[in-house]
Image: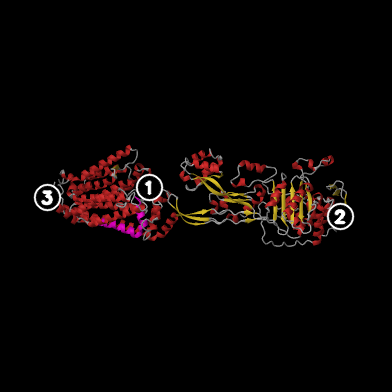
Amino acid sequence: MILEDNRYQVFSRRAFLLGTVKLGFFGVLYGQLYRLQAHEALKYKEIAEDNRVNVQLLSPLRGRIVDRNGQILAHNEQQYRLMLMPEHIENLETVIDLLSQHFPISAKEKKTLLRQARRNPKFVPLLFKKKVSWQDVSKAEFLSAEISGLISEEGMFRTYPHGPILAHILGYVSPVSEAEIKAKNNDPLLKLPDAQSGKLGIEENKDMDLRGDPGERHVEINAAGRIIREIKRLSPAEGKTQRLSIDLELQRFAYARMGLETGAVVVLDVRTGEILVQVSAPSYDPNVFTSGVDHATWQQLAQNPDKPLINKPIAGLYPPASTFKTLTGLALLHNNIVKPNQTVFCPGYYFFGGRKVHCWKKEGHGVVNWHDAIVKSCDVYFYEMTRRMGIQNLADFARLVGLGSKTNIELSGEKAGIVPDPAWKQMAKNQVWFPGETIIAGIGQGYLLTTPLQLAVMTARLATGTNVHPTLFHREHPKAFAPLGIHPEHLKLVRQAMSDVVNIPGGTAYAQRLVDMDFAYAGKTGTAQVRRISMAQRAAGIKNEDLPRPFRDHGMFIAFAPVDSPKYASAVIIEHGSSGSRAAAPVTKDIFLKMHELGYV
Amino acid sequence: MFNNHGLSLYLAMVRGHVRRLPTGILLCSCTLALLGVMTLYSVAGMSFDPWAKQQILRFMLAFALLLAVTLVPLQTWLKYAYWVYGGMVVLLVVVFFIGHVGMGAQRWINLGFMHLQPSETMKIGLILALSRYFHGVIPEERKRFSFLMIALLLVAIPFFLVAEQPDLGTAGIIFLSSVVIFFLSGVPMWIFITAALMAPLIGMIGWRYAMHGYQKQRVLTFLDPSRDPLGAGYHITQSKIAFGAGGLFGQGWGQGSQNRLDFIPERHTDFIFSVFAEEFGLIGTVFALSLCLILVGYGYSIALSCRNQFGRLLCLGITSLFFMHVSINLGMITGLVPVVGVPFPLLSYGGTSMLTTMIGFGLICNVAIYRRDEIRRATLGSRQSFWGPR
């Protein structure tokens, strides 16, 4: 029994030790339960809620773009697309290869898909092909019996029903790039699978307004990320409709009237600055850009010598040529350099600094006063008078009527053009000004460069004497523009001269006058030299029309109508059209006739 | 078999047994099992299928086995302790070879209505064998190297068979419950201290040569959970979230979002207590853990009042086994210890674990009934010192 006592003693002593250890463990476990379930419970409750609820953004519909009469220029169209569900696909690459036998995709598209699949969680669907036809949808339905994870769904796609007619105004939307997401502070809306952002044009300018506000969908998800049920839904708000100042009917007419010619047409309302027509030719179909343009099409557009990707009304730079004489003429009066009745004798050439400079009319205009000089576009008169006025007076006045700086139209890529003066030349070329450059500037040649929109704005300012600013948006409550401070009498004279260009015999655009109409328009022709005609060619009697097209002069015409109370101003450039009177003026005339038909004039 | 007289004597004995049955153990284990069934019902989306129904049937079977175990006299258990141990080893060897034939780690034998995991039942067999081995120990023997070596061999055979499966958790529990019996039977302290000091060395050797890649991974994940946020670490994180989301009063039966939405892994087995914690809150978990504490308390009170060494060792061995399951499982799912596949006794879905636990409680009850019996040990040096009294 001594043994039994000893064993019991040892046992009970050690059982006590062991029991204490166990109690200690129980204490730790109770403590851990308290810590998790009481002390840190709030934190874990939040995580559990985060686990449970997933907030998904719902893409808003992009706002529509309409013309001044409410005609749709850009909207969203329901189309079908094929999606791949990575979570139901074992080997994505094999499935893509298999599908591409039925729906061809490029190697690059395939690479993009695989990259997206790697980047996104498994349950985010991949866009395999968009804008598929009904036949393709039914084919996909048939295939989905074999290929799990292939589904067709309907989605909204940006569409431009008028294609190339408004391409340069509207711009286009295209899928968002990684760089763009970063640049826009990781805007969550841009990360949606079919997110698009505006590129160029109004789509770019009003991107934020057009985009709308995303909706939210709160869903309960399980551990695998699968949606169990929807908890709450906030509908997305459609983007704001943008009403443009463009008249679709007139724009379509002007685009069609350009035909195969290249160049630009701008028509604006001189009272409000609203642009009714802004054509850039040739153009492109923005619809091909919305789904990402393919390389071949892009190359074709980028390498086309007629530059369809350039928005010529705001980014095409042309010497204003003789259309500029209206401005020079007004500057002469404004600066008190000449009286309207002062005359210059034009023998067809002008000696300056020991060199002979030609008038466009070889045989000369004879005696010309201020009015005749504009109507007949006499170069010699303006050589002489600009010399007297000096370049600085001319440049200052050109800037007053809107040349040499951007009009701040609501489009990107606008060019400011050049109004040269000695200071500019020193800055840009680090050279001194030569007096010969002054007289060339007087007839709108030399360093002078303007955009067609600037010429239209210039015309509007000459026609009204007010500080017209152009806009592409419909102005509900237009404000009157401030006067420019040009003497009304001078304005009247220049308007009369421009009217006579068209409406009296001997005017350079007399052939394009309106007959039997209850209104008349005024204008000024211009022919911008692309390449100087050599003495040898001049001697051989080679005319501009005979040269290969790329060497022919640009034809330009600025105009306003009606003559007595100007409402609309226009500028038309026909590239390589040889002459303003024969190429650009007829287009202008037809547009005014169309405007008359539509009730504008 | 019995004549009328014999039958009435037997029934009188049974009545005496029933009076001496520690009803607290039965009550606590039934309550725990009920909580388990409720949680399984919730895990299945408020349905008896597929787990709760099975669990009820198994518990009924296990409860019957518990009662059956109490009816066999403690002396008989002592007598057949090595046979039970031997039988369990044979089963382990069988699954060891089945597993190898099946080119994988097969840990169970299909009995038709359940899968028997010999590694679970082995724990009971080993505790029985060690209790018997140390039952007759005298102080001199405890220090004898050869005496200890035989005991160590009893431990080593199942330990390596289980570790080879590979089931590190169970092997660890087998090892630890043996250590408890060695300790309680008075093996000198310095041996434990030396072993504890050598443990890091053994651990390093084990790390280098014996552990499987995924086992190493688990230990590393425990040390730094961010290593594997979507693997074991993710499971623990989600389990802790479930505990916290339960808060004081729980989300309500069948309402836990971590449970409903599959965020908790292995919800019906190892992580069942996380589900329970989410739905019944701190109130529920403290209640359940207290039931375990009461059960452990019963084990201690019975062991300390037992007049024979076999009963004492058996009782505390099984109590410690139960305690280890509870604390390792709870420690694991609350992020205190590495992820080892240990079920929560009576709550987790699993037939063998249920049977083993209830048979274990049956043995404790048995000790309670026979605690006044004094079982002599054989004289030193005789053949009986190993085989015990006949």
Nearer-the-camera pick, A434 or B118:
B118
Amino acid found under the numbered disc labelled 3:
Asn
Relative image position of residue A517 (x, y in whole percent): 78, 54
Residue A369 has which mark? 2
Marked residue chain, label 3: B
Indicate yes or no whether the magenta region holds residue B294. yes
Amino acid found under the numbered disc labelled 1:
Arg
**Disc 3: which residue:** B4
Q: Residues within 10 Å of mark 2 (few under 14, many from 20)?
A: some
Marked residue chain, label 2: A
**Disc 1: which residue:** B218
The answer to whether dots 3 and 2 both sit on one chain is no
Whole-angstrom CA distance, mark 2 to mark 1, is 102 Å
Camera-side mark, 3 or 1: 3
Nearer-the-camera pick, B302 or A128:
A128
Q: Secondary structure at mark 2?
A: loop
